[in-house]
Image (spheres, rainbow, N blue to C red):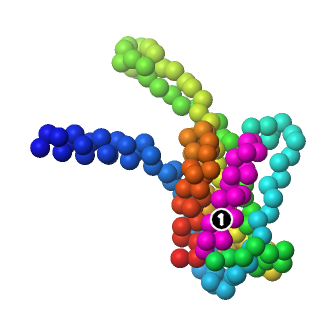
Amino acid sequence: MTKNIYLTFVLLIASACASIPSVESDFDSSYDISKYKTFLIEPIDGKNDSSQISLNPILIKRVMRSIQSELDFKGFSKSEDPDLIIKVLVGTNREINKSHESSQFFYSPNGWRDTDTRYYPIDKEAIAIRVYDKKLNEVVWYAFSRFKKNQVSKDQESIDDLIGNMLTNFLN
């Protein structure tokens, strides 16, 4: 019995560590996505300015390959005169997190204070996929995900899982 509880606990922890980042998606129901058959992925504009310095060109290639593969699998064809234009945005956000390294609190005239608060940066990658109707130049479908830098972006398989998760409800 104890062995089963231990095994269950280990499996829960392992699945939590291997989870795919959360994805937000939306679509405009006034468009019939099933009528679209062809697509073109618009290249990501990797500008050579200081705001783009943290963009990983290898990550961008992985994302583009994964989207191409996923759309091929869903029955779409790549075309120079497409029904859909796929635009991908990749960026890095820096967030500042706060941690309390100890539980030493003291009372001051302004209330209780922690003696050991630390602030540390966390870089998070963000990927957005926008699907446009080419004729109308309007977004018909959208997906967005944010994940810790280096958590997902180091191999093609991880990117394939993320992009597959992002495109799961596209054409379903």
Furthest residue toward left: 1
Mark 1, Cα crowd under 10 Å, few <14 / some 14-19 / many 20+, is: some
Q: Residue 125, image x and y in percent? A: 64, 44
Position of residue 111 measured from the top left corner of the image (x, y, whole percent): 41, 20
Q: Which residues are magenta?
A: 55-74
Residue depicted at x 32% and y 46%: 12
Residue positioned 69% across, 47% down in the render: 59
Identify whether 68 is placed above or below 60.
below
Reply above or below: 41 against 156.
below
Q: Is residue 88 left or right of residue 121?
A: right
- In this view, the residue farthest toward the right is 48
Task: Give the total of numbered labels.
Answer: 1
Q: Confirm whether residue 30 shows in the render.
A: no
Magenta highlight on residue 61? yes
Q: Give the quadrant of the N terminus.
A: top left
Say which residue label 1 marks. Answer: 69
Image quadrant where residue 171 sits: bottom right
Please say whether residue 107 is one of the residues in the magenta stretch. no
Quadrant in which residue 78 is drawn: bottom right
Q: In the picture, residue 86 is in which quadrant?
A: bottom right
In front here: 116 or 35? 35
Q: From the viewer's perspective, is 81 left or right of 100?
A: right
The image shows residue 34 at horizontal and vertical percentages of 62, 83
Residue 97 % position (x, y): 54, 31
At mark 1, the secondary structure is helix
Residue drawn 73% across the image and 50% down it: 60
The residue shown at (57%, 51%) is 157
Q: Is residue 86 visible?
A: yes
Q: Nearer the viewer, residue 141 or 107?
A: 141
Main secondary structure along the magenta-highlighted residues: helix
Q: Amino acid at mark 1?
A: Ser
